[in-house]
Every structure is written in structure tokens, then in C-alpha cells.
Amino acid sequence: MEVTINDVRYAVNRALDDAFPDVAISGEEIKQMPGPPHFFVRLLEPAHTQELGRRYRRDHPFVVRYFSPERANDDMYNMAEQMTAALKWISIGGGKCPGKGMRFQIIDEVLHFFVSYTLLVWEQEPAATKMQSFEQEGKVIET
């Protein structure tokens, strides 16, 4: 099964929605910010690196911004703790993928939670060239 970049984005949103059903989630396409509490999920700079032959590693770094209704550090630190558990694993492509490099900081009364997901993907093997025609000749030698 092929896993796309959007599949990873949707899996992160799904994990947040499962853990925090009462908190609105927005993505890169937002036109107007909803009122707090809400998450703003952004995929930063994904990388696609060849490892060996047809195998590639894809890194998907995310920042999840949490806008607290209280704007209190206590609330944001509690949310960071809960997000660590919620984003520890995401379900994708029929399996689980671990979140790595989790860290967070509070900037201008907004929690910024960073997490990255790494997947190995394989390039499809090129189709082998099929034989177009084959001629065979035989002789019988009598002795």
C-alpha cells in the first residue's frame, strides 16, 4: 500500500481528533482562525532521501500550535503532556508509525509542539523489457 504525504497529515489530524474531540483542528488552508481552544497543524519541510537501491526515507516534521482559551502556561504545559501521549503513535497504512523528536515551547501565549514521523518507502520496480520475437533454428546431423 502506498502512503502519501497527505496520508501522514490526515493521520496526525485523526490522532489529535481522537484524543481531543472538543478542540477544533485547522490546517495550512485556513481562511479564518476559529476561536480558542484550537489546533493549527502544519507540515514543515518534508524530506525524501534515497537510502539503498529503491528504498527511500521520508521525514515528515510537524508543528502543532495550540491556542488555549485561558492563555495560561499551566494549561499549555498540561496540553503538551497530553499531546505527547496522543502523538506518540499514529495509525497509517494499516500500521503504526512512532512520533520522534518531540519537543515544545510557548511563544507569545501559544504552545508550539514539534514532532516528526519517518517512513520507509520503496520505488516501484521498473517493468522488465519483454522479448519481442524469438527465432530458433535447428539441424539434425546424421552420422
Image (tube, rainbow, N blue to C red):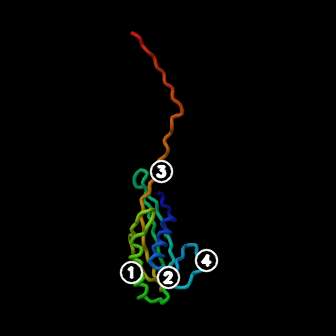
The numbered mark, 1 or 3, whose residue comes first in the sequence reads 1
Instruction: Tell me the residue at 52%/65% (across/down).
Output: 6
Label 4–label 2 contact, CB within 8 A? no
Report how far apart the C-alphas of labels 4 and 2 lie in the structure. Answer: 21 Å
* Percent of width and height locating residue 112: 45, 79
Q: Residue furthest top?
A: 143
* Percent of width and height locating residue 37: 50, 84
Q: Is residue 3 visible?
A: yes
The numbered mark, 3 or 2, whose residue comes first in the sequence reads 2
The numbered mark, 1 or 4, whose residue comes first in the sequence reads 4
Label 1–label 3 contact, CB within 8 A? no
The numbered mark, 4 or 3, whose residue comes first in the sequence reads 4
Label 4, residues with CA under 10 Å away: few <14, some 14-19, many ≥20: few
Horizontally, residue 42 falls left or right of residue 100, namely right
Report how far apart the C-alphas of labels 4 and 3 lie in the structure. Answer: 38 Å
Horizontally, residue 81 falls left or right of residue 110, namely left
* Percent of width and height locating residue 68: 48, 86
Q: Which residue is mark 3?
A: 124
Q: Secondary structure at mark 1?
A: helix
